[in-house]
Image (cartoon, helix red, strand yellow):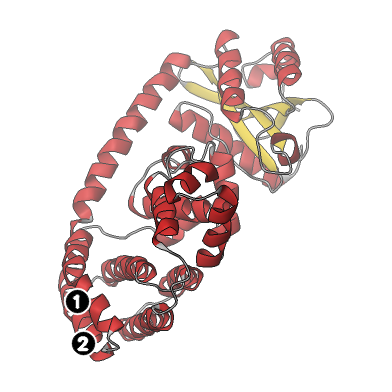
Amino acid sequence: MKKSDDIGISRRTFDSILAEYCEKYPVFLCAVDICGNVCMADDSLPGRTDDVWRQIRVHAIMESFRWGEPILYDQPAGYIIWAVPLMYNSRMTGGIVACAKEDDVFDEDSRFLFDLTSACRDLFSLAVRENITNDQFLAVHRQIHLREQKRAEAIHDMKSQAARDVLERYLQSEPALVSAIKRGNRGQAVEIINMTLTEIYGLGGDRLDVIKSLLMELVVTMCRAAIASGGATMELLGNNYSALVELAGIDDEEHLSGWLVQMLDRIMDSISAHLSQKHVADDIERGMNYMEEHYGEDITRGQAADEAGMSESHFARLLKEKTGLSFTDFLNQVRLDRAAELLRKTDRGLMQIALDTGFSDQSYFTRVFRKIMKLTPGQYRTKFRLHDEPRP
């Protein structure tokens, strides 16, 4: 092990923080150098010498240094990790890393057993109190990254104007498209879509990545319209996800055209097959609309049922019949759809996206997102974010 002087914290200071912090929170605590090597910890620390753990510890302290505050990570599997950088003036010398078993964080119903946000804040406060980190330096970093985030969002808004133009044109023609599908006039429906495609290829030019982004936005919008018109919710949501996976692997326009024809057929077939099946009355629609409009709030099944004008149990049964989902699963799906859109279009941090879409914590958001989407939010952003840079 390295000497404590190498990382800027004495054994006495670490033991003091360890005793005070672990008395309040069921966590493991360690002091590490900038390479993630454990310098101080109790004997029960998991992954002490494991290389994967070491890399995760490095990532945790580097991100806390970058953002100016602890960031939560649900890695390795079964654990939650956060960290505070150890600093000498403006130089990072290592970090204090906390990790907790998920079983100690969540109960069987995925409810929090303790407040992770408070745990992050308290670890940071202890480091400031013991003068082993630079609070003023990190505060400046927090402000810089907040400004950069707002600037990046503004730039993305401008860059995505092409996508908005296409979608606005599509929305103008959407009533005629839905009407054509209801009448079984698939030829007219395809004609309307082809007009939109002409504009997409015109805006995308020879940039396949831009064209793919615009087409994906078009398909997502069409799926929403299809669900509103009577399409099978789960089938179309599945189409949405599978479409993203398929689209990511396409690298030429010929296959792209084939993919789009297939997607349009799926959407039209779903609408045609389910238009006549009116399983749910207007009151259940009001409850669902309430959930879609208030997804960012802490809404309950009772509130949605009241909006629909029925009992909670009756609302839950009709919602299950309509969507195949429970109240919680449907609400999570609505929230995840919006979260996925924010991941593709913005540079907002995962914690901010979690809060904006109604999740109380980044870790729980990550768990639900990974369960439904089969990818972590970070993996989803890396794989599917919009490539909408202007052409040189």
The kind of residue on which mark 2 rests is: Gln
Q: What SS does tag 1 mark?
A: helix
Up/down of 131 relative to 259, above or below: above
Q: CA distance from mark 1 to mark 2?
A: 9 Å
Q: Nearer the viewer, residue 109 or 194?
A: 109
Q: How far across and down, in percent of the image, does residue 232 sit?
A: 46, 73
Q: What SS does tag 2 mark?
A: helix
Left or right relative to 41: residue 36? left
Contact, CB < 8 Å: mark 1 with mark 2?
yes
Q: Nearer the viewer, residue 112 or 203?
A: 112
Residue at figure coordinates x 42%, y 46% from the top left: 307
Q: How far across and down, in percent of the image, does residue 347 sit?
A: 36, 45
The kind of residue on which mark 1 rests is: Ala
The residue labelled by disc 1 is 176
Q: Which mark is residue 188?
A: 2
Up/down of 373 relative to 110, above or below: below
